[in-house]
Image (tube, helix red, strand yellow):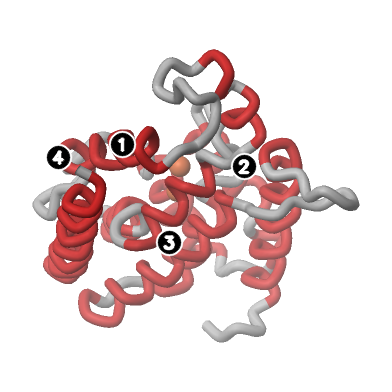
């Protein structure tokens, strides 16, 4: 596939529109009907980068994986998305063909999209596209990007609006001393390098976890 594929351009355009409409609720720009951040779009872009990194070593069907990347979260445009994997699979089944996407690959894309919300290590070995999407989707949350999104999501309007009632922020503002423990809390629970299907995903996860540990340790050392 190349960058000029009609279905690729259209899937990206739709994802940008859908996520932007939701982003305006959370990060409204001071002027105009726009947003100053779009968490979900940044996530999807990172999932594409990570899918390509993993496929560069592990191979896989590039067209099926990249289509699945741009479809998988379209029913979770920012933070809400009940059954968004199933909904996205249904959407792909009904719409991908008309976009000029190869018909014989559609079932593979739908399966990947539907399985991306599965729990850890729950996807069968023959579902390669689904495993690649799952790995990329989870790997995308690791490393420095995870920190940036953590902070940007804590600056969203709904979160800032609730600061007055949030006992974690007694000064009713985002102080580093109050927000750092929330970040440090994520250290043990969220990041595991064995929760991936492919060797290259595990290698990238280990690398990013190393960076996170160094960051957490330095932050702790600097503040306490
Ligand atoms: Fe998702
Ligand atoms: Fe995702």
> Sequence-wise, which precedes: disc 1 or disc 2?
2
- Work out whether mark 3 precedes mark 2 in sequence or the reverse, and give the earlier one: 3
Residue at 53% in and 48% down: 152
First in sequence, mark 3 or 1: give its number. 3
The 10 Å Cα crowd at callout 1, few under 14, some 14 to 19, many 20 or more, is few
Residue at 24%, 41% (x, y): give it.
Answer: 184
Which quarter of the figure has residue 25?
top right
Per the image, the residue denoted by label 2 is 77
Element type at mark 3: helix
Give the quadrant of ligand 1. Answer: top left
Secondary structure state at the residue bearing disc 2: loop
Residue 95: percent from left, percent from top:
67, 51
Disc 3 Cβ-to-ligand 2 distance below 8 Å = yes
Q: Check if mark 1's residue and mark 2's residue have beta carbons within 8 Å.
A: no
Residue under numbered circle 3: 47
Mark earlier in primary sequence (2, 4): 2
Q: Is residue 59 left or right of residue 76?
A: left
Mark with earlier residue (4, 3): 3
Nearer the N terminus, badge 4 or badge 1?
A: 1
Residue at the disc numbered 1: 118
For label 2, count other residues whose C-alpha is less than 10 Å away and answer few (under 14), some (14-19) or many (20+): many
Q: CA distance from mark 3 to mark 1?
A: 16 Å
Q: CA distance from mark 3 to mark 2?
A: 15 Å
Residue that numbered label 4 is attached to: 188
Compared across the picture, whether 63 is left or right of 101 comes to: left
**Which residue is at the front of the view, 64 or 75?**
75
Position of 175 compared to 94: left or right?
left
The 10 Å Cα crowd at callout 4, few under 14, some 14 to 19, many 20 or more, is few
Q: Nearer the viewer, mark 3 or mark 1?
A: 3
């Amino acid at each position: 596939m190349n960058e000029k594929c009609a279905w690729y351009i259209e899937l990206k355009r739709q994802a940008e529109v859908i996520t932007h409409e939701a982003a305006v609720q959370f990060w409204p720009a001071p002027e105009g009907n726009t947003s100053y951040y779009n968490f979900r779009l940044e996530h999807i872009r990172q999932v594409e980068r990570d899918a390509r990194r993993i496929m560069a070593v592990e191979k896989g069907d590039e067209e099926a994986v990249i289509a699945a990347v741009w479809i998988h979260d379209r029913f979770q445009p920012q933070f809400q998305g009940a059954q968004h994997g199933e909904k996205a699979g249904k959407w792909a089944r009904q719409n991908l063909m008309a976009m000029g996407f190869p018909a014989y690959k559609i079932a593979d894309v739908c399966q990947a999209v539907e399985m991306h919300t599965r729990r850890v290590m729950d996807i069968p070995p023959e579902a390669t596209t689904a495993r690649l999407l799952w790995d990329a989707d989870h790997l995308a949350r690791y490393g420095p990007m995870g920190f940036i999104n953590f902070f940007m999501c804590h600056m969203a309007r709904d979160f800032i609006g609730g600061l007055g009632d949030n006992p974690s922020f007694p000064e009713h503002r985002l102080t580093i001393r109050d927000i750092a423990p929330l970040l440090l809390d994520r250290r043990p629970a969220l990041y595991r390098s064995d929760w991936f299907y492919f060797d290259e995903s595990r290698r990238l996860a280990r690398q990013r976890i190393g960076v996170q540990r160094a960051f957490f340790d330095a932050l702790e050392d600097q503040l306490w």
